Image (spheres, grey):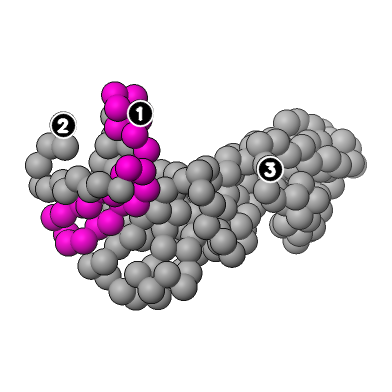
Amino acid sequence: KKLIFKKPIFWIVVLPLIIIFLFLYLFLFSSKFQVTSIIISGNNSVQSKVLESIAWNNINKNISKSIFLTGPEIISKDILNEFPQIESVRVSKKFPQTINLQIKERIPFAIFCQTDGKKCFYIDENGIIFKILEQIQENIFIIKKLIEDKEVFIGERVVEKNIIDTISKIERNLKDNFQIDIKEAIISTPFRLDIETSENWQIYFNLDSETD
C-alpha cells in the first residue's frame, strides 16, 4: 500500500489541517502568548489595582489568556463605564505577554452647580461632569445654568463644548490682560452668558456674537 504522505489527499487536505491546528494551538493555548502582566500609566485618582482587575476579568473570560483573544475595545469600554473621571483609555498589546493601559483622566475646568446649590460637580473642558463635591473650593470658579433645572448625572455633558470654549477664552483674557479672575459664569438664557468677576462686577455676553 502507498504511504499516506504519498497520496495527494494528504498534501491537499490533511497537511493544511494539521498546520492550521498547530497555528491555532500556538496562538490560543501556548503559554508563550498568554498574558502575564498588565502595565498601567497615567492614572492618579483611580487605583491601578482596580483598573488591573477590570482588565483581568475580561482576559479570563476567554477560553485561554491568549494575547490574541484579548479585546482592547471591551476593556476600554468597561473602564470608561466604571469611572466617569477617566476621559479615555488606550489599550495596546506588547507581544508576547503584556497588555498596556494608558489612562487619561479628566482635568477639572470649573465647578458646575445646580441652580438650587444642593449638588456641585467637577466639570471638564468638554462640559462633562465627573465627580460630585462635598464642599466648594476657593481657587476654581463656578458655572451655573439657569435655563435648565433638571437632575444631572455623573458622566453627562451639561454644558455645550462651544460655551465652555467661550468661558475659557474670557477667563484667559481677563487673567492675562487685567489680572482679574472669574468668580462665576452663569448661562442665564440660550443666548446670554453672565460673568461675575473676583472684583464683584459683571460682564454680559451675547453667545451669538464674538466675545472679543
Name the foreground residue: 20 vs 162. Answer: 162
Q: Residue at x 36, y 55 (%)?
A: 143
Mark closer to the chain start, 1 or 2: 1
Q: Identify the mark nearer the N-term, 2 or 3.
A: 3
* Residue bearing the label numbered 3: 44
Instruction: Determine whether the residue tagged by mark 1 lies in a helix, strand or loop.
Output: loop
In the visual, does 136 lie left or right of 206? right
Task: Judge left or right: residue 114 versus residue 138.
Answer: left
The amino acid type, in three-letter code, at marker 1 is Gln
Disc number lying in front (1 or 3): 1
In the rendered image, the quadrant that contains the C terminus is top left
Can residue 73 be seen here? The reply is: no
| Mark closer to the observer (2, 3) | 2
Of circles 1 and 2, the one toward us is 1
Read off the residue under disc 1. Answer: 179
Inter-mark Cα distance, 2 to 3 = 36 Å
Q: Is residue 109 above or below residue 176?
A: below
Contact (Cβ within 8 Å) of mark 1 with mark 2 = no
Q: Who's the residue at 54% across and 52% down the image?
A: 137
Which structural element holds mark 3? Answer: loop
Q: Residue furthest top?
A: 177
For the magenta stretch, what is the residue range?
A: 174-199
Q: Quadrant of residue 34?
A: top right
Crowd band around label 2 with a 10 angstrom C-alpha radius: few (<14), some (14–19), many (20+):
few
Q: Position of residue 174 (x, y in %)?
A: 29, 32
- Which residue is more in the foreground, 99 or 19? 99
Contact (CB < 8 A) between labels 1 and 3? no
| Image position, residue 12 (x, y; %) | 68, 39
Q: CA distance from mark 1 to mark 2?
A: 17 Å
The amino acid type of the residue labelled 2 equals Asp
Residue 212 is labelled as 2
Q: Secondary structure at mark 2?
A: loop
